[in-house]
Amino acid sequence: MHPYFLYDSSLTLAVLLFGYSMQIFADFAGYSLIAIGLAHLFGYKLPINFNFPYLARSFSEFWQRWHISLSTWLREYLYIPLGGNRRGELRTYLNLFVVMFLGGLWHGAAWSYAVWGTFHGTALAVERWCKDRITIPTNRVTTVLQVLAVFSFVTLAWLLFKLPKFEHVIAYLRALFTSRAETRYVIPASILTFSAPVVLYYAWHVLKQQREAQLWQRYEFLLFGALLAGIVLNSGLPGKFIYFQF
Amino acid sequence: MIRNSLLVALALLVIYQLVQPRLPHRFYLVQGQRREGFLTAQNFVYRSHQETNLLLGSSMTMMLSQSILGPGFYKLSFGGGTPLTGLEIIRRSGVKPAVVFIEINNILANQDEELLKDLFGPVAFPLRRGLSSLREEGRPSNYLAGALEATVRKMCRWCSRPRAAGPAPTGAPAPEKPLDPKQFEQLLRIQNEAQEHAPPPELLHSQVNRLAEQVDAVSRQGVACVFVEMPNHPAIARLARPTAIRTAMEERFARTKYRWFPSEPSQYATRDGIHLTRVDADRFSKAIVDYVNEMNREVTATATVTKHSR
């Protein structure tokens, strides 16, 4: 496969990455919700698997919100048996690193997944080190910056899932920061259009947490109706879920 | 909540069905080659049209200029596709064109079953015939993306306005950018890697036979079939794969018995080794129009001779 993305502008590449972040969330969280909804029809209450992970303010919070079933399993069966945070500082960082490295390999026996796990393990360890030493004031500005920082890092790391070859990942990152190709607005426009439902989903969740929550909840049916109409009108052929390959 | 949501959805669907035909087409964006293929196929099947000449093939044929070909031509071609898909669509839709141009460059691919299934699905087909909002052309996301693209383009033009000169674009296509030689070499290398090996003989002959069945079926209905080898860069045209395809096609569809469109690869330039530059796509389109006009003159002359000989 030739990396045709080499001929795209930095803006297009950035939007493509953002779009993949939205796609992987919609794909994975979406089919988890389908499973939860279907089980509910039969009277079974399954726990939620995604809790708006892109609103996480830290990597540890991200892993409490993303693929909760896997992260819970990793904590119960790997992190805690390895000693968790009870064997001193250095051992805690090592445990975090090892657990995420193995969590990466859980997705497949490929270097890209191992590197992905390593990124997250390193991020968790560094974050733990910083948390023990630096206090960040909590206000709206710092919250937004933290959310953006975590989202950016997580999104960059998704590249390792999307591109099968490691050299393509490097080429993509290089092109992301150095490309001078002209932007074809078609691609960003399409990506942003299809990312809109995910963005709306998150925005709705944030609005519902405000003081006027009841007001928003009263008119929720309008949003659901519009989304349902959108699904019917924009439907295409069924594709494979991304996470089915794992 | 569920009932209200369903009612809202139904209301929106009805409103959209009424409003969609009136939406301005200037804010419309087909999102990618695959969706363009669906649009092409659906427009062919659902719209009544007067085209008597069809062009079947891949993205190479899609490069031809519709404005030069004129309203009598329809490009039933798909990116990465094969004329087998177009022939199957003709068969299933019952349309009977006068002339079908069959691109031979990409016959190794199988017909697009996914597209055919979507197009002729037992529920989708009649529903879409009645409700244009359910067709590819009616997708709200196409209008949203189009409006977004137009807005971003306007903003970027506004941001760079000291450098922008001249009047706003009139809608005519922007002049084609000159090819970057390094990029062209890289793209040529990619095509070289993709086409340097001959295909397995059993695959090639099976596809040629499949094509022959389809061609014979449309020919029996009085449709004139013309085989076209879309011009590639001479270095690509000489490679093992295109050579094997050309040889197999000429063996099965001898030039003495079947119509072949005359084209010489060295007369045309490509952007990437296989797709014509805009200028040469226009030239090729004109050549096709001239060929069809010549065919029509022959038919008229033959009919006149036949009439007089009675």
Image (cartoon, coloured by chain):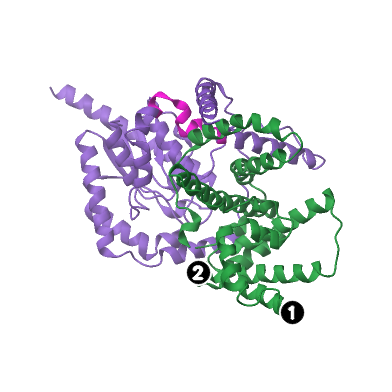
Chain colours: A green, B purple
Question: Residue B17: percent from the left, percent from the top?
Answer: 50, 23
Nearest to the observer: residue A54 or residue B166: A54
Give the main secondary structure, helix, strand or loop, of the magenta stretch.
helix
Nearest to the observer: residue A224 or residue B133: A224
Say which residue appears at 31% left-offset and 61% top-offset. B244
Q: Is residue B126 left or right of residue B34?
A: left
Quarter placement of the N terminus of chain B? top right
In the rendered structure, which amino acid carries the disc numbered 1? Gly
Q: In the picture shown, does residue B220 fall above or below B257?
A: above
**Count of labels in the image:** 2
Q: Is residue B215 left or right of residue B229?
A: left
Numbered tag placed on residue A153 in the rendering: none
**Chain holding disc 1:** A
Direction left: furthest residue: B310
Q: Which residue is mark 1?
A: A88
Does any portion of residue B147 appear in the rendered image?
Answer: yes
In the rendered structure, which amino acid carries the disc numbered 2? Gly
Which image quadrant for residue A149?
bottom right
For the record, the magenta segment spans: B128-141
Q: Are marks 1 and 2 in contact (CB under 8 Å)?
A: no
- Magenta stretch contains residue B136: yes
Q: How crowded is the residue under tag 2: few (<14 C-alpha within 10 Å), some, or many (20+)?
A: few
Nearest to the observer: residue B200 or residue B8: B8
Q: Which residue is mark 2?
A: A108
Does any portion of residue B255 appear in the rendered image?
Answer: no
Judged by depth in the image, the label closer to the viewer, 1 or 2, is: 1
